[in-house]
Amino acid sequence: MCWQDRSIASELGVSVMMKRTYLSLSVFASMFCSHAWATDAAHVLCLNPAKADTSELYQFIENSLGKGAVESPSDLVYTPRWPHISLHGDADVPAYLAVLAREPGDVNLDGRSIAEGGDRSRTEIKIAPGKNGAHTAFHAHEGDNFIYAWRFKIDAAMKFSPSFSHLHQIKAYGGSYAEPPLITFTALSNDNSDGTLEIRHVADRKNESGEYQILGRLPLSQVRGRWITVVEQIRFSNSDGRYQVSLHDQDKALLQVDTQHLQLWRTGAEHMRPKWGIYRKHHAMLNQDKDDYVYFANIGITRGDVMAACP
């Protein structure tokens, strides 16, 4: 995870007001390496929509991340159709994605309601699995290094439960172990407490057994209602993986993780890819009949171990 002293705000499409957020990351990054920045656009994939992309937002996302990059099955549950990913902006962040979740009506990819036995809902964007398009260069294979950078904000009124609410995942495509995610950012709450945000690692499993390793944890109170900057670097290896991540709120470091010798590959997988959004299990502790939002901005994917600049 490599940074120079100069700000990366302009290179990740961030407003000038947020430059100091990224400047602070250079201090943390010096713990890991001293590489220079890369500026080769062939090594970086950026998702930075502008307000002009509002009417064709899903198409814009798929033009960047590949056909099938949008997973929003709940759009069609409501009449009229209710897009669960929309584009907004404010003085600090000119354009960001608003991902919606609403209990109890939202569904998973199978479209089953709670009455039909559905137990979870999903609205996410991802690197699409398709083999045609520029996005395929950003499918991670065993031995690859990738850096994922983004910003997110959890709506201050959003509620969580003891069951999972994943806001970010690294998942496999293909193979016998593709169902459970490899890495998750999971928000949890018990007994109406404010709760925690956990970064979890799951080794090879054929189903969601509930077994995982917590790599890092912080109180949700530190991230609710704030734009949080994330830089995540992964060395994908079945036996010698390395996972590094930093979370910052402006100049304040909230969490820093550097864990080595992990299984950071799914045996038999075709590739690994990142996902962002809301994937959660239905639960009575979640807000009912109320819109919940998590916001995402300035998503950048770098192939390699040197952070590349978004054009």
Image (cartoon, rainbow, N blue to C red):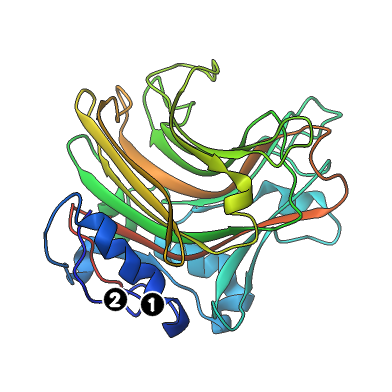
Tell me the tag on residue 263. Answer: none
Residue at (68% x, 29% y) in the render: 163
Q: Is residue 28 visible?
A: yes
Nearer to the camera, 8 or 117: 8
Looking at the image, is 287 positioned above or below residue 44? above
Which residue is label 2 attached to?
7
Residue 38 sits in which quadrant? bottom left
Number of marks drawn: 2
The CA span between labels 2 and 1 is 6 Å
What is the secondary structure assignment of the residue under circle 1? helix
Residue 201 image position (x, y, % from top left)? 41, 29
Q: Is residue 13 visible?
A: no
| Amino acid at the residue labelled 2 | Ser
Residue at (82% x, 31% y) in the render: 114
Q: Quadrant of the C terminus?
A: bottom left
Residue 202 image position (x, y, % from top left)? 42, 25
Residue 24 image position (x, y, % from top left)? 33, 66
Residue with the most extreme left position: 35
The answer to whether 46 appears left or right of 109 in the picture is: left
Residue 96 sits in which quadrant? bottom right
Which residue is label 1 attached to?
19
Residue at (53% x, 67% y) in the render: 59
C-beta proximity under 8 Å, tags 2 and 1: yes
Residue at (11% x, 58% y) in the render: 34
Looking at the image, is 17 positioned above or below residue 251? below
The answer to whether 187 appears left or right of 60 in the picture is: right
What is the secondary structure assignment of the residue under circle 2? loop
Q: Earlier in the sequence, mark 2 or mark 1?
A: 2
Residue 129 image position (x, y, % from top left)? 40, 45
The answer to whether 284 appears left or right of 261 in the picture is: right
